[in-house]
Amino acid sequence: MNKAFAKPQLQSKIGILVIFTSSFYKVLKAVLISFAYLLFSSNAKAKLYILLGFGVVGLLSLIYSFFYYKKFKFHIDYEQKEFVLQKGVFSTEFINIPFDKIQQVYFKRSIVQRIINVYEVAIDTAGSSQKEVTIKALSKEKADALRSILMDLAAEKTTDEIENNVEVETDAVHTSKSKKKNVEWKHQLSIFDLLKLGLTSNYLRGIWLIFLFFGTIMNELNQLKIENTYVEDSANYLAENFSDSSGIILVAFAALIFTFLVGIVISTIEIFIKYFNLTLTQTTSSLDLEMGLKTNTRTSLKPRRVQLLRLSTNPIQKRLDLYEAEVSLASSADNIQAQKGKIKIPGLAKEKLQKIKTFLYNRAEETSEAIKPHRLLIVRRVMLSLIPVVIAFIPVVIFSWYEWQIIAPMVLIYVALSVFLNKKYYDSVAIEFTENFIIKKQGIWNQETEILELFKLQSVTVKQPLWFKKRKLYNLEFHTAGGDLSFPLVHEEVLKNLNYSFYKIETSTKAWM
Amino acid sequence: MDSVESEFTNQQINIDLLPDHQAVDFETISKKKQTKSFYQITIGLVILLAGWGVLFYFLPAHWSLYLVLGILLLFFGFAYLNASLLQKKYGYALREKDLIYRRGYLITKTTVIPFNRIQHVSISRGVFDKALGISTLKIFTAGGQGSDVSIPGLLPNLAVNLKEAVAKKLTVEEYE
């Protein structure tokens, strides 16, 4: 192997621009309020000072960026078997990443990075304290070279433990070029696919985003003490024209439909931004994924890194043969709950999904008797859903109990709906303990299947609330390096399946990561 | 994978005959853990009572002040009760290939950690631990917070022994 990157080196010169824009952007974000003030205020003097301030901040960021660029050096230490990064303008920080701690190396590209044609290389580590390390600007050749060298080194360090023959095959003298030829199959999302996905996805998320968006805007406006006349005007208009109960219901209904429609649009836009140009390629050793409109990310998945697999679809998407796979990778302990280690691949046909499964697990599908939770789960979930109603009821009882003709039917409908949906949920939830897997299924609309390979388990927690002691009911929690999988209210008898899980973990000599 | 020369067996596995993780006898932890909790709660109580006293002295007498005092006392009464109830539930057990740790009164949690999934083990001793002569054994896995375990109220010698026992298992596993 030639010793590329053996000497400390700088990023691409043009990278100063990337560092500058990102640091200037950070500063700008922090002073966004004063910027808004600039737009709204009529005080010319204040405007001048603020503009001047921005100029100074811009200049300082530019100087800072230059020194940051000069001080930012990285190299591969082949002797010590680690990747070394040195950075910091005022104090120098050394970051050493041993090869075997490297989880993944992938590319990211923001708009700026794409305009000036550089790649951001991110190195994901398995340590608990070290976070992801990024090199902001490298030319395509360098980025590609660095990635393949690091990935090879990371694989080399651990191949001796790997049993997965798929990986051993490619371990020979393959260069990155010959690897690219071994494409087994490809999955691409066209604009039409994205549109289909957007229209059939979960709108709740889109609606939630609207609320968040308006919430922040209202907050900012309030801080600026700008009179929000629209809200007051519309409130007055509503109070004048729709004061009886049927009017209120009509307005609420219209608002609901409007929100729903906007939710669809927002969800679709989000999907376009996130998954634009998604390409999934399977080579002999890994699954390579590329996607994104705003930031283009490229990742390479190896079966060994995968800790949990979640497959999901909904009835409409099922009809259109669209399935989603979400892969949880081992990530550092601090951000295990965060989305970082999770990679979503939407819009897969069933046959492609099957291929991913076979590739990841290298095993035929297994099923066993589905175990259901105790029926008390319905009661528990209905009770939980009633908590907001009870809380909302307290002011109602105090202030407007005389409106009971409207309130009572609404509460009744809510309770009936809750019972119905939770019954449906109960029907959908089940867990299977097969020879090599734990499989959990759940979901009324969005039907999810979570698959956990037994030897990837880290530990298991069994919880028993005091009030379920007599009934001998337990909640299960399976911990993996890629997140937890939990299952509620199973009977004591089910716990003996855990003994089998422990047996499997404790006799396994395979590397779980 | 095992080498071919090693004795090959392939017995059928009967789930009912596998060692049962529920059938272990838990070791209890030192009573001093309860004393430690009592000390900590008492310090909190003293600080809050002092704060209440200041308010009582400077503010005009009002019924809400007494309400606050009542809630405070009730809360701390519950905290003492909880600490003594918790004490009975702490327990750990070592098996040949894993460690089982149980805690919690209202919700009893039992975590089973196989030795070949433990990342590292450490012993920590806070101010109270030092004063009372106890230690806390911390066990870390790659499974995140839910999976990590810290066993409080161990006598220092025992904690060291346990740590060494676990560490030994870890190295044995690696060479197997």
Image (cartoon, rainbow, N blue to C red):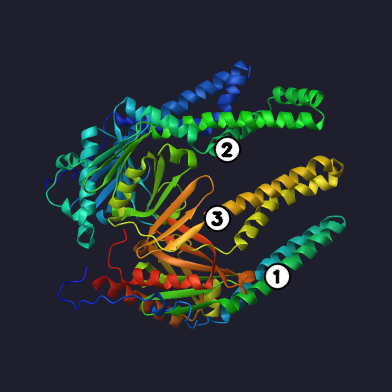
Where is residue B1 drawn, in percent x and y?
22, 68
Where is residue B150 drawn, in percent x and y?
48, 70
Where is residue A261 drawn, in percent x and y?
57, 29
Q: Amino acid at mark 1?
A: Phe
Residue at the disc numbered 2: A208
Instruction: Identify the image quadrant of residue B84.
Output: bottom right
Q: Between A498 and B90, which is closer to the camera in this rendering?
A: A498
Question: Residue A379: which numbered mark, if any?
Answer: none
Q: Amino acid at mark 2?
A: Trp
Q: Quadrant of the C terminus of chain A?
A: bottom left
Mark 2–mark 1 Cα distance, whole angstroms, equals 39 Å
In the image, residue A69 sits, relative to residue A103, either above or below, namely above
Residue at the disc numbered 1: B78
Mark 2–mark 3 Cα distance, whole angstroms, equals 27 Å
Chain under numbered label 3: A
**Are labels 1 and 3 assigned to the same chain?**
no
Q: Residue at x 42, y 50 (%)?
A: A310
Where is residue A33 drawn, in percent x and y?
58, 29
User: SS of the residue at dot 2?
Assistant: helix
Q: Between A49 and B86, which is closer to the camera in this rendering?
A: B86
Residue at the disc numbered 3: A427
Give the mark toward the camera: 2 or 3. Answer: 3
Give the mark toward the camera: 1 or 3. Answer: 3
**Are labels 2 and 3 assigned to the same chain?**
yes
Mark 1–mark 3 Cα distance, whole angstroms, equals 39 Å
User: SS of the residue at dot 3?
Assistant: helix
Instruction: Identify the image quadrant of residue A99.
Output: bottom left
Q: How many marks?
A: 3
Q: Is residue A8 visible?
A: no
